[in-house]
Image (cartoon, rainbow, N blue to C red):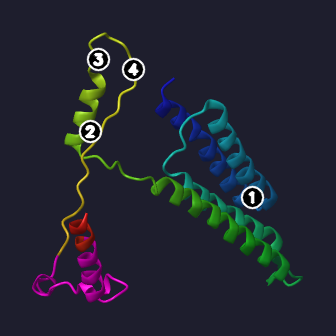
Amino acid sequence: MADSIKTGIGFLIPVGSLVGFIQSLLANDYITGIIFIIGGLMLWMLYILVVESTTPALMGNILIVFIVLLSLAVFLNYGLAQNIWGGYELKSDGSIIALLVLFFGCLIGMMFRQHLLGTPAPSLSTEDQDLVNKALGQSDNGGSTAPKVIVVKQEAPPAQEDEEEDEEEWDYSNMYAYPPEYYEDYYEDEDDEDDEE
């Protein structure tokens, strides 16, 4: 089975979970909505592991949407209470729990997005990639499959030199520990010793 078909079938699980969540939300059964969201995410990730399909590129975004829905269901169930006159009161404990679910869930979703979006781009140009593929495709004279080493030319970007740096001459006195006169005497002593021998 092709990988895209596996991924496409896997998307049926979160869609079904979303439909169940909306139905339970319309029926004012928020606990069932929480179960639909958590169960749908768990089944979907289990499906990805069992079938060994690639993680979809929208995984982080889907996680963020499901976590927002989960925190909404938690808030509606535990953060609001109806009083005897028919109005609603805000319960601080349930509201804080809903905010914590939202925060940590969105944090995990953002990590999934960065992990998928942060993949490094190939460093070879198309011409270099063609050369590498051509070199790998060629067989040795004996027809053996010995390992090959391919060296790809990597050029550093041209350095931008200022005109002022070209005009100034380098001060060599910073390179030595002693003044230049010391070294001149040292080399003269060596020359004298060579002449004596």
Which residue does the numbered mark 3 point to in the structure image? Answer: 139
The span shown in magenta is: 161-190
Task: Name the spot of residue 123 as percent of width and height, x first.
Answer: 32, 50
Which residue does the numbered mark 4 point to in the structure image? Answer: 146
Front residue of 79/41: it is 41
Which residue does the numbered mark 2 point to in the structure image? Answer: 129
Which image quadrant for residue 83? bottom right
**Few, some or many C-alpha atoms within 10 Å of disc 3 (few <14, some 14-19, many ≥20)?**
few
Tag 1, which secondary structure? loop
Magenta-span inclusion, residue 174: yes
- Residue type highlighted by circle 1: Ala
Distance, label 4 to label 2, CA atoms, is: 20 Å
- Residue type highlighted by circle 2: Gln
Tag 3, which secondary structure? loop
Q: Cβ–Cβ below 8 Å for labels 3 and 1?
A: no
- Residue type highlighted by circle 3: Ser
**Few, some or many C-alpha atoms within 10 Å of disc 4 (few <14, some 14-19, many ≥20)?**
few
Label 1 vs label 2, nearer the camera: 2
Which residue does the numbered mark 1 point to in the structure image? Answer: 27
Task: Name the spot of residue 144 as percent of width and height, x first.
Answer: 36, 13
Q: Cβ–Cβ below 8 Å for labels 4 and 3?
A: no
Distance, label 1 to label 4, CA atoms, is: 67 Å
Q: Residue furthest top?
A: 142
**Few, some or many C-alpha atoms within 10 Å of disc 2 (few <14, some 14-19, many ≥20)?**
some
Task: Name the spot of residue 56 as percent of width and height, x first.
Answer: 51, 45
Please name the residue shown 81% across and 58% down the image.
31
Magenta: main secondary structure: helix
- Who comes first in sequence, dot 2 or dot 3? 2
